[in-house]
Image (cartoon, grey):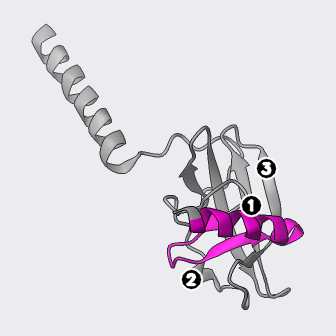
């Protein structure tokens, strides 16, 4: 019995470590954070993001939640590179984006979304980051 319990604990530990190393397993979604959000690991903290295309207003609306589940941002986002809002199929968040941050949303298609309310300052930050890499 004890031998079986030890084997189970060892295998569980190895599986947990392998999961964290290979996939960066997402933590448990905080209460109040919608199920369609994507976990984004950060340097000092993590957050959850989601974006939708609002066809009635022809805009992309994104939300960012902190690790405790509080809303950090909930507003219209616009493409960093200009252009029209993206449709729902393009709004796939890349948790490993090259300049991801709680207010900068990287998408799997390589595009970046910025909050409309502070687009100019965030655009400068993204340009500086991209130049540095």
Which element is circle 1 on?
A: strand
Q: Nearer the viewer, residue 1 or 37?
A: 37
- 17 lies left or right of 72: left
Disc 1 versus disc 2: distance between alpha carbons?
17 Å
Residue farthest to the right? 117
The residue beneath circle 2 is 89
Tell me whether circle 3 and circle 1 mark residues in contact (CB < 8 Å).
yes
Res 63 label: 1
Q: Nearer the viewer, residue 27 or 73?
A: 73
Q: List x then y, in percent, for residue 41.
A: 54, 47
Residue at 75 percent of width and 68 percent of height: 124
Q: Quadrant of residue 66?
A: top right
Residue numbers of the magenta segment: 105-131
The residue beneath circle 3 is 71
Residue at 73 percent of width and 91 percent of height: 84
Whether residue 1 is visible to the viewer of this picture, yes or no, is no
Which element is circle 3 on?
A: strand
Q: Nearer the viewer, residue 2 or 41?
A: 41
Disc 2 versus disc 3: distance between alpha carbons?
24 Å
């Amino acid at each position: 019995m004890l031998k079986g319990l030890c084997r189970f604990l060892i295998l569980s530990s190895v599986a947990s470590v392998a999961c964290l190393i290979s996939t960066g397993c997402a933590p448990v979604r905080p209460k109040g954070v919608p199920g369609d959000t994507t976990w984004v690991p950060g340097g000092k903290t993590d957050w959850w993001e989601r974006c939708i295309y609002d066809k009635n207003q022809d805009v992309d609306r994104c939300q960012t939640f902190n690790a405790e589940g509080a809303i950090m941002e909930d507003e219209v986002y616009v493409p960093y590179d200009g252009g029209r809002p993206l449709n729902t199929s393009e709004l796939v968040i890349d948790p490993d984006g090259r300049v991801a941050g709680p207010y900068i949303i990287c998408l799997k298609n390589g595009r970046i979304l910025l909050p409309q309310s502070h687009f100019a300052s965030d655009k400068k930050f993204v340009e500086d980051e991209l130049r540095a890499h």
